[in-house]
Image: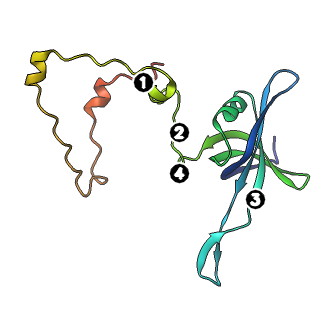
């Protein structure tokens, strides 16, 4: 649809994420994101928090189920979608919602540690007694060179020998 304003909202979830289903059974979630803009105060010569702007976000379909399961109050999020002003309130019909990684660590199904996922970690194979005596002690890792970010990346041997985690 033309004439819609696409916006990116970055802020904290306020309150509870409400999950409901339409008459046809489509999941729909609604939550409020409070964006606090940073403003420069010329009189004091420093930055400060501006007036909080609440935005009511709505998502539908599978995204609604994911949002309801993952988001709680005070989680920092980034949401994009079509912005509209209805009844003197900002509404965002979200196309995408994600956790703001500047504030949180996020795990996906494939990277969730086994202990947190409720799975038992894979058992380690016991080393043969004679092999344990011959094994070299682990060497400490060398510190990176001071200009390591400027050097060209090396192909990791692990990238070639380690199978993909996704298996897809």
Gap in angstroms between the C-alphas marked 1 and 4: 24 Å
* Mark 4 / mark 3, whichever is N-terminal: 3
Tell me the element at label 4.
Answer: loop
Q: Quadrant of residue 163?
A: top left
Real-space Cα separation, disc 4 to disc 2, in angstroms? 10 Å
Residue at 28 percent of width and 35 percent of height? 156
Drawn side of residue 139 relative to residue 90, left or right: left
Residue at position x 8%, y 23% in the image: 134
Of mark 1 and mark 3, the one earlier in the sequence is 3
Q: Secondary structure at mark 3?
A: strand
- Position of residue 63 relative to residue 130, above or below, is below
* Residue 47, percent from left and from top: 60, 73
How far separated are the C-alphas under marks 3 and 2?
25 Å
Dots 3, 2 in contact, CB < 8 A: no
Q: Which mark is residue 53?
A: 3
| x 79%, y 32%: residue | 28
Give the number of the disc on residue 165: 1
Disc 2 crowd, CA 10 A, few/some/many (<14, 14-19, 20+): few
Of mark 3 and mark 2, the one earlier in the sequence is 3
* Percent coordinates x, y for residue 162 in the rendering: 32, 24
Q: Considering only order in the chain, which callout, 2 or 1, is on the residue closer to the N terminus?
A: 2
| Outermost residue to the bottom | 43
* Mark 4–mark 3 distance (CA, rounded to whole Å): 20 Å
* Image disc number at residue 106: 2
| Earlier sequence position, callout 1 versus callout 4 | 4
Residue 145 image label: none
Callout 1 crowding tier (Cα within 10 Å): few <14, some 14–19, many ≥20: few
Can you identify the residue that label 4 sits on? Answer: 102
Q: CA distance from mark 1 to mark 2?
A: 17 Å
């Amino acid at each position: 649809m033309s004439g819609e304003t696409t916006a990116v909202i970055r802020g904290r979830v306020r309150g509870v994420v409400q999950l409901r289903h339409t008459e046809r059974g489509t999941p729909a979630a609604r939550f409020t994101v409070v964006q606090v803009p940073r403003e420069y105060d010329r009189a004091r010569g420093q930055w400060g928090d501006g007036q909080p702007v609440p935005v009511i976000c709505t998502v539908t379909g599978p995204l609604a189920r994911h949002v309801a399961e993952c988001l709680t109050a005070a989680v920092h999020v980034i949401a994009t979608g079509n912005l509209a002003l209805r009844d003197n309130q900002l509404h965002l019909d979200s196309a995408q919602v994600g956790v703001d990684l500047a504030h949180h660590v996020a795990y996906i199904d494939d990277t969730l540690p086994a202990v947190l996922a409720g799975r038992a970690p894979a058992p380690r194979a016991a080393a043969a007694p004679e092999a344990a005596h011959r094994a070299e002690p682990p060497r400490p890792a060398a510190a990176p060179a001071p200009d390591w970010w400027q050097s060209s990346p090396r192909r990791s041997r692990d990238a070639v020998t380690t199978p993909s985690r996704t298996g897809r």
